[in-house]
Amino acid sequence: MEEQHYQSIIDEIWQKLKKKHLYPEIPMPKVRGPLEQGKGEAEEDEGVGLEMKQKQMTINGAFVSKMKGKMPEEKVIEALLDHGITHYTFCPWDFHTHLRLYAEAKKVVGDKELAKQVSNYFIDVIADTHCVKKRFTEIPELHRNLTKGAIDEVIAFLYQKIWGIDLGIQPSKTSGKTQADIVRRLARIPYLDRPRWGESIQKFARSLKPLLVEEQRQQETKGEKGESHPQGEHDLNHYSYEEIDQGLRDYARQTMALSEFKDVVEDFSEELKGAGYGMEGGMGRGQKNPIDADILFYMKLAENYSIPIKKVPLEQKGSLHPHSHSPWEVGSPFQEVDIWTSFGKIMPGITQIWTKREGKGRGKIEGTPDCLIAIDSSGSMINPRKSLSYAVLGAACATNAYLRNDSKVAVYNFSDAPMGGKDILNYTDQREDIYRVLCKYFGGGTALDLEDLMPLIQGKKNLDFFIITDMKITNLEALIGFFGQIQNRVTAVHIGDNPYAARFEKAVERKKNISIFTVKRKEDIPHIVLGRIRDYFNPTHIKNS
Amino acid sequence: MKPTVSPKKKFFIPSNKVYWTAKNPFEEFKAFIGSTPELPLDQIVQCTEAIMDRIRWGYEKLLEEEAKELVWMVQYNTIIKAYEVAEKYVKEVDYTAEDIEDFCFALENTQKIPYLIPGPAGVYISALCNYAKEEEIVLKLSELKTEINLIGFRLPRGKRLMIEGDTGDFTGIGLEGGELVIEGNAKNWTGAGMRGGKILVKKNIGLHTGEWMMGGEIYVGGRVRGLGNIVEGKVYERDKLVYPGKVRYPNHFY
């Protein structure tokens, strides 16, 4: 009954709220009734006023009922919704910002749970302060009436100071000086200055850390769970799968640091799994399958780059061409009518249509062949699981480019191949499997075993070859000889300049099917045009293949 | 003469006068324009920024005057001279202990302060601490990547400076009766030339501790790596008096 009443209040005020927040794209909030649970849990449930899942805000009816005696229900609901909407319209705005704030907080507090708490408090302070400054809101009234724990009291004390509104907070006699010190530091932070949020949350964390550590210690001693947050928790439930995906992509691009990305992904691994986030083939799903943060890093980072592929004329893929006639029936497509044999008439029994068949339209239809990626993981290359490897990033971008064009990719990861330092993956379109082999690191000597490549090449008329190495290969001459024989399109990417790379470039400079690129910085990666050949329209490689 | 308006073109003038008045299509949002009240936060942040600018300006002037080539040699005379210059600029600014802490972190932000030269920076921070209004100053510097040298230089009687984190070389040199507490480690030459007061280092301390100290006490919670040539005063290691004492000799490193 109460839920219906609260829902009717929301129906009534929702248009006003939308207008107040400049019409955000948020669905109509819902009301949730009390959960069926034990007494303790029911009390805990009453403490949370707002839940947010993806973009759906849900008001907790039990919380509103509890607050009824202190302030009007409409005002409680409006304040909660003001707060919730501001999370979408100002802070954190997106998952990337949330991750960034969390990572900055963790640098200061060092602990995962504390960093989550710090970022939650910081996000709330910004949202509420923004709302108080920019909109007419009941948030101060809500804070005046909320039941507060030790940290909430400090935060309310801070609000009192920075909003200039009396929230009825008196510093306690025992911890008054400490509280005042903390609040004095917190009040100096420019909360509404978005570009400075990174530096601001560090300052916020430094000031709040002693209180959080003390609270955590007390909870551990008592074996209690932390107090629930009246304005709702900020977890990954706020975001949709696509937002999380985009957030990880942006975060990988912005940090460009494997260790930082790995830290954050590992800290949020449970939530990511809970949100159904993982990789294809089930990685990241299920309790016993941890998310491989290294692979995820290269996956998300590679998604930021789009490498074009020059298509080639493929033999087996032809267009449909007119093959034979069949009688026209009502409903058959007019554009297929053969006007010459139908005598210019549309009449059943007389009119004929073309029946088409797929022909071998060689030279007419372009497609993308499969690709064999050879990646060097010798000791002279960077370990992709320790720091950002441009070789793996480049190979990952190439993988994405071929898979996007419905082609398959095989991987030959080599170090000292004749001595067993190699991993071979046959042609597949499973991105996760490909990335796993790409990220493998042997760290030994550098030699190719050309015998390993033969099974991957044989029987493939159209095949692109992509090799990424620093060219410090022991049997470089054998590789040059091998490239001299094949007519496939070859994209050779070498990391940095060195005499071996110069030797390779000189040896293959006359081969028109080989394109060479140098990657010195991450910015060089988008310049790679896979399968680019100097004389694209010269069909020699097709004739010979 | 050509008519200015083509006779074929006709303007439609609505008969209803209501349509005739121009209507702002954003009328709906009018209520939100200018409805941003000034919060005390804005004033606090503005004021903090202004003070930080002044402090930064003073530091840059100090560098201009004392480290022209961006090189600064730690010598008795250079420290004294740099401190005098720092005093001149610091006295002009009205600041709090939090401003000093913010300045320490701003030093690491190359966008704000282009040069962090540990010597002059330490002298400048010491001057800021010595001229602060507060008698007790707490600087939470544990997240600072750089260890600041010369912190606590000439800390006067009646002042208590507490540093959360580690400090660099020459910590608390020339202490003038104040109390300096280091929650972490301190490096070499700590308390050199101090005349009075107390230095408490909760963890370990480096070489040449108390070199030419003329008075006062140094308490070390961890280990003392080496004592200097002490003239007068006391040094304690884990509550045990190590100077004056029979076991330890000046410049004895252990």
Image (cartoon, coloured by chain):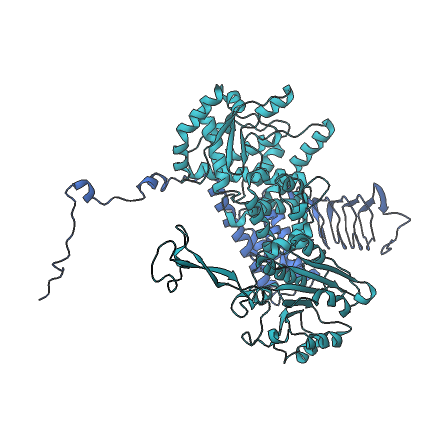
Q: Position of residue A17 (x, y in %)?
A: 41, 34
Residue B141 in sight: no
Judging depth in this view, the residue of A71 and A315 nearest the camera is: A315
Q: Position of residue A464 (x, y in %)?
A: 63, 67
Drawn side of residue B239 relative to residue A156, left or right = right
- What residue is shown at x 38% (from left), y 57% (from top)? A350
Drawn side of residue A395 relative to residue B24, left or right = right
Judging depth in this view, the residue of A99 and A203 nearest the camera is: A99
Q: Position of residue A3 (x, y in %)?
A: 49, 22
Q: Is residue A401 above or below residue A8?
A: below
The number of numbered badges drawn on the structure is: 0
Residue A470, located in which quarter of the rendered image?
bottom right
What residue occupies the far left of the structure in this picture?
B1
Q: Position of residue B188 (x, y in %)?
A: 77, 55
Judging depth in this view, the residue of A76 and B226 nearest the camera is: A76
Residue A95 in sight: yes
Judging depth in this view, the residue of A510 and A385 nearest the camera is: A510
- What residue is shown at x 58% (from left), y 23% (from top)? A35
Drawn side of residue B194 relative to residue B226, left or right = left
What residue occupies the far right of the structure in this picture?
B247
Residue B71, located in which quarter of the rendered image?
bottom right
Q: Is residue A79 above or below residue B24?
A: above
State the hue of chain B. blue
Q: Which chain is cyan?
A: A
Q: Is residue A404 above or below residue A246?
A: below
- What residue is shown at x 50% (from left), y 33% (from top)? A57
Quadrant holding the C terminus of chain A = bottom right
